[in-house]
């Protein structure tokens, strides 16, 4: 009998090892108008999570078809190509880049819990499209609209959708956490008081496995549904993440407790203990942490909106001998920008005439205005105080200091600490 048990365990272990670490079906690319195109489904993981047949020197377009909501897969990050793109829920998002050399390149969600690999093989074709701005600033656009333009200083449709998705997730998680806390606390209180402190005044009804089952079952299936759904989907993709671990652990504890409750006679008397309180506590605390994390990221989104609001919408420039008032996205490097007292500087540049005190507190945190004169560098979104300035634009659009700050905040918002 013992050999049968050992043999069965070995076979099952081998099957599980093959399931998770065996060969996986790879996705192949198709070429459309000189661009290598691959569709990746995002649903508890990436499918396919291995992409082969990509050639270097040819633009690649990954179409991420996201079929779920939630924070984990709301962004995709490709460090090798400097991609950090938002993936709105239930939309298809295109991410483009140009692999220059052969090799393996990883893409992952912002939380680094779901990942995939792109294998680039071969050599660049002789008639390959030259690597242009696409490889340096990858395009990531949602079907609902363009990404936020740092130069224009306004929220895009995709950013607004991301905020709406996060607000909906906060409401949903709040309901689930409240249900989990209300139903788990009586069971946890009774079990801990009785088991740890030997309290005899605990009502016997609270220690009854049937009542504990009635209280914890909604926590298992309603409160824990986001965890179980993502966990089982990850397992179906032959990968494992934190959600899979929680799902397997709580299912094992809940299933064992069901056996003890319904069929106690099949187990020795010393093993007839239920673990309903552990199931409720684990699921509720995990979702509470997820709720706090989502709220923190929502606060970061508000900070981004405030940063964007610092930038003026228009600029007065001198071009070809004429003074013009143009949108900030129309300012070019080399334009002469004219600033009157009390106005905000639209872009970064270097002073060529005039002298004035400039309030840079919104960027540097320094409360005392800094005097700027000919040859000094000025920062966009700062406020001119008393004098008039003329300066030559040196950085515009996404190259300005404010745009770089916004970019760093966004990247930090969509990733986790190493």
Image (cartoon, rainbow, N blue to C red):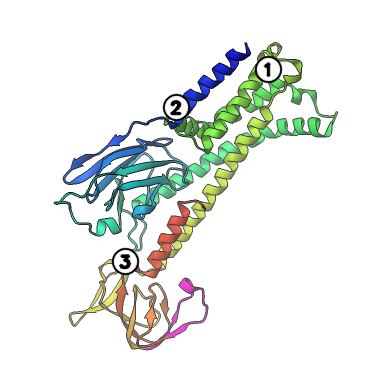
Q: What distance separates the C-alpha of mark 2 from that of mark 3? A: 50 Å
Q: Position of residue 126 (x, y in %)?
A: 15, 51
Residue furthest front as drawn:
3
Circle 1 — which element?
helix
Viewer-side residue, 381 vs 79: 79
Look at mark 2 in the image and give the residue it sits on.
18
Q: How many marks?
A: 3
Query: Tag on residue 289?
Result: none
Q: What distance separates the C-alpha of mark 1 from that of mark 2? A: 35 Å
Chain-order first, disc 3 or disc 1: 1
Q: Residue at x 85, y 29 (%)?
A: 201
Q: Are marks 1 and 2 in contact (CB under 8 Å)?
A: no
Q: Residues within 10 Å of mark 2 (few under 14, many from 20)?
A: few
Q: Residue at x 55, y 44 (%)?
A: 290
Name the front one of labels 2 and 3.
2
Q: Is residue 183 visible?
A: no
Task: Please indicate whether residue 88 sits to the left or right of residue 291 in the image.
Answer: left
Q: Position of residue 361 (x, y in %)?
A: 49, 75
Query: Would you identify the image quadrant in which residue 398 lies?
Result: bottom left
Circle 2 — which element?
helix
Q: Residue at x 64, y 32 (%)?
A: 280
Look at mark 1 in the image and give the residue it sits on.
261
Look at mark 3 in the image and give the residue it sits on.
397
Residue furthest left as drawn:
127
Q: Residues within 10 Å of mark 3 (few under 14, many from 20)?
A: many
Viewer-side residue, 234 vs 146: 234
Task: Please indicate whether residue 298 sits to the left or right of residue 53 in the image.
Answer: right
Looking at the rendering, the stretch of residues picked out in magenta corresponds to: 355-371
Chain-order first, disc 2 or disc 3: 2
Q: Is residue 388 visible?
A: yes
């Amino acid at each position: 009998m013992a050999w049968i048990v050992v043999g069965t365990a070995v076979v099952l272990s081998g099957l599980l090892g093959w399931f998770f670490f065996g060969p996986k079906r790879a996705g192949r690319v198709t070429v459309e108008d000189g661009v290598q195109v691959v569709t990746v489904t995002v649903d508890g993981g990436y499918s396919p999570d291995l992409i082969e047949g990509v050639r270097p020197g040819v633009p690649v377009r990954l179409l991420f078809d996201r079929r779920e909501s939630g924070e984990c897969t709301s962004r995709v990050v490709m460090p090798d190509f400097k991609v950090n793109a938002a993936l709105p829920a239930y939309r298809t998002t295109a991410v483009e880049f140009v692999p220059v050399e052969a090799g393996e390149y990883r893409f992952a969600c912002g939380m680094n819990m779901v990942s995939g690999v792109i294998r680039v093989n071969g050599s660049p074709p002789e008639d390959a499209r030259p690597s242009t701005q696409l490889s340096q600033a990858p395009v990531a656009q949602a079907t609902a609209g363009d990404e936020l333009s740092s130069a224009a200083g306004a929220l895009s449709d995709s950013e607004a959708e991301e905020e709406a998705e996060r607000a909906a997730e906060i409401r949903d998680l709040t309901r689930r956490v409240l249900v989990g806390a209300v139903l788990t606390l009586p069971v946890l209180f009774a079990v801990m008081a009785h088991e740890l402190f030997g309290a005899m005044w605990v009502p016997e009804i609270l220690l009854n496995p049937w009542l504990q089952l009635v209280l914890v079952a909604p926590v298992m299936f309603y409160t824990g549904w986001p965890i179980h759904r993502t966990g089982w989907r990850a397992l179906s993709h032959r990968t494992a993440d934190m959600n899979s671990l929680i799902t397997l652990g709580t299912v094992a504890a809940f299933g064992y407790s069901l056996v003890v409750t319904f069929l106690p006679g099949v187990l020795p008397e010393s093993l007839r203990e239920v673990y309903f309180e552990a199931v409720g506590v684990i699921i509720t605390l995990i979702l509470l942490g997820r709720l706090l994390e989502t709220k923190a990221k929502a606060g970061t989104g508000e900070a981004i909106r405030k940063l964007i609001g610092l930038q003026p919408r228009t600029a007065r420039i001198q071009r070809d001998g004429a003074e013009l008032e143009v949108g900030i996205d129309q300012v070019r490097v080399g334009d002469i920008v004219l600033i009157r007292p009390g106005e905000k500087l639209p872009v970064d540049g270097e002073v060529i005439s005039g002298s004035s005190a400039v309030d840079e507190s919104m960027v540097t945190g320094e409360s005392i205005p800094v005097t700027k004169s000919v040859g000094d560098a000025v920062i966009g979104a700062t406020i001119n105080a008393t004098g008039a300035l003329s300066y030559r634009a040196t950085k515009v659009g996404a190259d300005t200091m404010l745009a770089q700050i916004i970019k760093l905040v966004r990247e930090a918002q969509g990733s986790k600490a190493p």
